[in-house]
Amino acid sequence: MKNRKYKRWHISKSLRIVDSKSNQSLGSIRNISSKGMGIICKEPLTPDKNFNLKIVLTGDDFTEEKDIEIEARTIWCQKTENKHYLAGLKFENLNISNEIRIKTLILRMGHSA
């Protein structure tokens, strides 16, 4: 999509997205911006549904950091040819601390989408 309002970045490492309430994995980040993210998941996400999520920070790159806990809303979801789903999520009520953490994540691990 060329008409995006915010630049999207691919992350050089697969980072899981977990529903904070159920602790169930929803998928992994496909791309991210300062205002939202695209994820790939095995089950469809309902459009306009709100979630409390964790971006799970694992591995040597994040030994001292806690997961990023955010609120997000599903904007769209579509099935792929390989029986997975792609979903677009918009961050909601993002506090300044998590906004900085997401921008830092992009700086450390992002490459142009």
Image: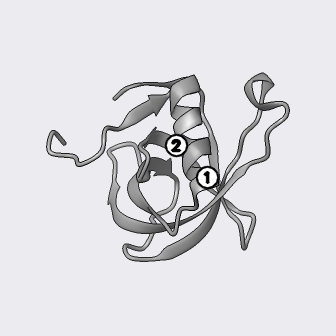
Work out whether residue 12 can be spotted.
no
SS at badge 1: helix
Image-quadrant location for residue 54: bottom right
* Residue 5 shown left or right of residue 16 in the figure: left
State the colouring used for the structure image: one colour
Q: Quadrant of the C terminus?
A: top left
Work out whether residue 9 can be spotted.
yes
Circles 1 and 2, Cβ within 8 Å, touching? The answer is no
SS at badge 2: strand
Q: Position of residue 8 (x, y in %)?
A: 35, 38
Q: Quadrant of the N terminus?
A: top left
Of tags 1 and 2, the one toward the viewer is 1
Residue drawn at 44 percent across, 42 percent down: 32
Residue drawn at 72 percent across, 40 percent down: 57
Image-quadrant location for residue 61: top right
Given the image, on which type of amino acid does mark 1 rest?
Asn
- Above/below status of 54 relative to 63: below
Q: Which mark is residue 7?
A: none
Q: Which mark is residue 29?
A: 2
From this viewpoint, which residue is outermost toward the bottom?
Answer: 49
Q: Earlier in the sequence, mark 1 or mark 2?
A: 2
* Mark 1 → mark 2, Cα distance in angstroms: 16 Å
Image-quadrant location for residue 51: bottom right
Q: Position of residue 37 (x, y in %)?
A: 44, 49
Task: Give the residue number, with chain letter if any, for mark 1.
Answer: 98
User: For the residue carrying disc 2, how many other residues have a C-alpha within 10 Å: few (<14), some (14-19), or many (20+)?
Assistant: many
